[in-house]
């Protein structure tokens, strides 16, 4: 059964070539079930399908999970650690996990890790952006409001953001929780 593609960017796919694409993708990228499924569906839209039966993506993805090529929980932990090291807060980590298709069970440990590291992530963000204790000079109210908004966009809570933004240059900001 041939299925026409939206655009033809190569020869038609069959079950073996689809599996080869999937294997190449998981060997090249850290990925999730959702991302691999989306990738394979996109490839099917781009090329023709040349098989007797419609392509069955889900069993292939589950087989890759069984083989250990895909681990959503590990992906979530690594993504949370990476974002925290770049200064992003728990809310931003949660959004990134949602976009990667991580379900609540697989993301629970990653969000707990993000929660534990929220102060260090905020410190990293403030240092990168020269905010509050890492600024060269005390900023006016308008500049502080912009810095506060940047903190919030980075996924930090208002309480943590305010402690850093309204601190004077050189002050020590500590976790009071």
Image (spheres, grey):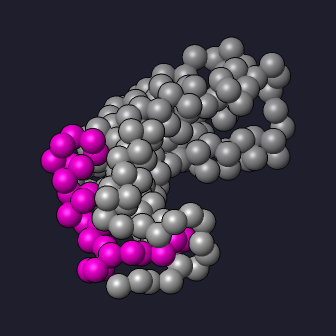
In the rendered image of this protein, does residue 154 appear above or below residue 164? below
Q: Position of residue 129 (x, y in %)?
A: 71, 30
Q: Position of residue 131 (x, y in %)?
A: 70, 29
Number of numbered discs: 0
Direction from residue 165 to residue 143 in the image, left or right? right
Q: Nearer the viewer, residue 171 or 77?
A: 77
In the rendered image of this protein, does residue 174 appear above or below residue 79? above
Tell me what residue is drawn at x 38 percent, y 34 percent.
78
Q: In the rendered image, which quarter contains the N terminus?
A: bottom left
Tell me what residue is drawn at x 41 percent, y 75 percent.
49
Tell me what residue is drawn at x 28 percent, y 45 percent.
70
Where does the magenta region start and end? 45-70
Q: Residue furthest left?
A: 66
Q: Is residue 163 visible?
A: yes
Q: In the rendered image, which quarter contains the C terminus?
A: top left
Q: Position of residue 48 (x, y in %)?
A: 48, 75
Q: Is residue 132 visible?
A: no
Q: Position of residue 46 (x, y in %)?
A: 54, 71
Within the magenta stretch, is there residue 1? no
Tell me what residue is drawn at x 20 percent, y 57 percent.
62
Quadrant hosting residue 102: bottom left
Q: Nearer the viewer, residue 142 or 129?
A: 129
In the rendered image of this protein, does residue 162 appear above or below residue 132? below
Q: Nearer the viewer, residue 93 or 175?
A: 93
Q: Nearer the viewer, residue 97 or 137?
A: 97
Within the magenta stretch, is there residue 48? yes
Direction from residue 140 to residue 99 in the image, left or right? left
In the rendered image of this protein, does residue 44 appear above or below residue 16? below
Quadrant hosting residue 41: bottom left
């Amino acid at each position: 059964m041939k299925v026409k593609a939206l655009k033809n960017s190569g020869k038609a796919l069959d079950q073996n070539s689809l599996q080869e694409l999937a294997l190449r993708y998981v060997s090249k990228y850290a990925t999730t079930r959702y991302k691999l499924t989306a990738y394979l569906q996109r490839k099917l839209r781009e090329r023709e399908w040349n098989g007797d039966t419609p392509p069955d993506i889900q069993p292939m993805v589950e087989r890759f999970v069984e083989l250990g090529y895909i681990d959503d929980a590990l992906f979530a932990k690594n993504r949370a650690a990476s974002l925290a090291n770049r200064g992003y807060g728990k809310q931003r980590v949660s959004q990134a996990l949602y976009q990667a298709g991580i379900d609540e069970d697989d993301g629970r440990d990653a969000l707990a890790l993000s929660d534990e590291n929220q102060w260090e992530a905020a410190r990293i963000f403030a240092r990168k952006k020269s905010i509050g204790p890492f600024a060269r000079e005390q900023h006016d109210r308008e500049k502080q409001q912009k810095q506060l908004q940047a903190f919030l966009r980075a996924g930090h809570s208002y309480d943590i953001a305010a402690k850093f933004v309204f601190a004077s240059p050189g002050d020590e900001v500590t976790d009071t929780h």
